[in-house]
Image (cartoon, helix red, strand yellow):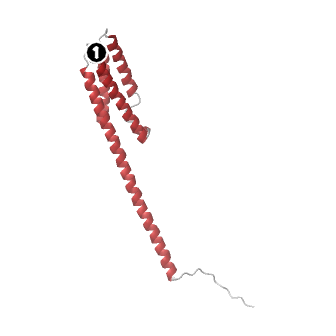
Amino acid sequence: MMYRKTQSRFQTSNTDLRLQRRVLLGACAVLLIAAVVFGVLYFSGTGYRSQTRMQLRQRMYGASVSSIDEVSRLGSIVTTSASSRIGRVRQYIYYMEQLNALSIALEGNGGRLVPDDTFPTLYSDLETLEGLILQSTSPTLDARTLLLNHLETLRDYLGQQ
C-alpha cells in the first residue's frame, strides 16, 4: 500500500491577502492618528503649565513690589497709619503664600515658586515689626529694614526666573 504524502499548506487567495493588507494599513493609520492627537494634547498641556506658572510668578512679583512699597512708607516713628500698612503687608504676604500653594497644588513640589523658608521668615519679621509698633517705645528702623531686605530678596528672586 502506498501512502500519498499530503502537504498541508496554508494557502491564501489574493482576496485574503488584500483584506489583510487593508486591515494592516487601517490599523497603522489609526495608530498614526492617535500618536498625533496625543502629541498635540501633550504639547498643549505643557504650554498651559508653563503659562500658568509664569502668570502665578508675575502676580507674586507684583505682590512683593506692593508690599515693599507699603513697608517703605512706614517711617521709623510710629504713626496712626502704621498698623493699617502692616495689615496690608500681611495681606500681600498671605496672597503670595496662597499663590505658591496653588502652584504646588497644580504641579506638585516641583511647582514651588519660592524656597520653603520664605514665608515663615517674612511672617517672623512682620511679627517683630508689629510688636515694636504696638509697644511704640522702641525704634522700628532695624525691624523695618530687615523685613524690607527679605521682601527685596524675594522680589529679586522672582524677577530672575
* Furthest-top residue in this view: 137
Q: Mark 1 belongs to which amino acid?
A: Leu
Crowd around label 1: few <14 · some 14–19 · many ≥20 (10 Å): some
Q: Position of residue 47 (x, y in %)?
A: 34, 48
Q: Is residue 23 left or right of residue 97?
A: right
* Furthest-bottom residue in this view: 1
Question: Compared to 59, does 28 lie above or below?
Answer: below
In front here: 104 or 94? Answer: 94
Question: Compared to 114, does 36 lie above or below?
Answer: below
Query: Please, what secondary structure does the residue beneath circle 1 have?
Result: helix
**Rendering quarter of residue 26:** bottom left
Count of all numbered marks drawn on residues in the image: 1
Q: Position of residue 155 (x, y in %)?
A: 29, 30
**Rendering quarter of residue 115:** top left
Q: In this view of the protein, can residue 159 be seen by the observer?
A: yes
Question: The C terminus appears in which quarter of the rendering?
Answer: top left
Query: Residue shown at 30%/15% (left/top)?
Result: 142
Q: In this view of the protein, can residue 161 be seen by the observer?
A: no
Q: Is residue 77 left or right of residue 117?
A: left
Q: Position of residue 125 (x, y in %)?
A: 36, 20
Question: The N terminus appears in which quarter of the rendering?
Answer: bottom right
Q: Position of residue 44 (x, y in %)?
A: 36, 52
Query: Residue shown at 27%/26% (left/top)?
Result: 68
Query: Residue shown at 36%/17% (left/top)?
Result: 128
The residue beneath circle 1 is 141
* Furthest-right residue in this view: 1
Question: Compared to 32, does 53 lie above or below?
Answer: above
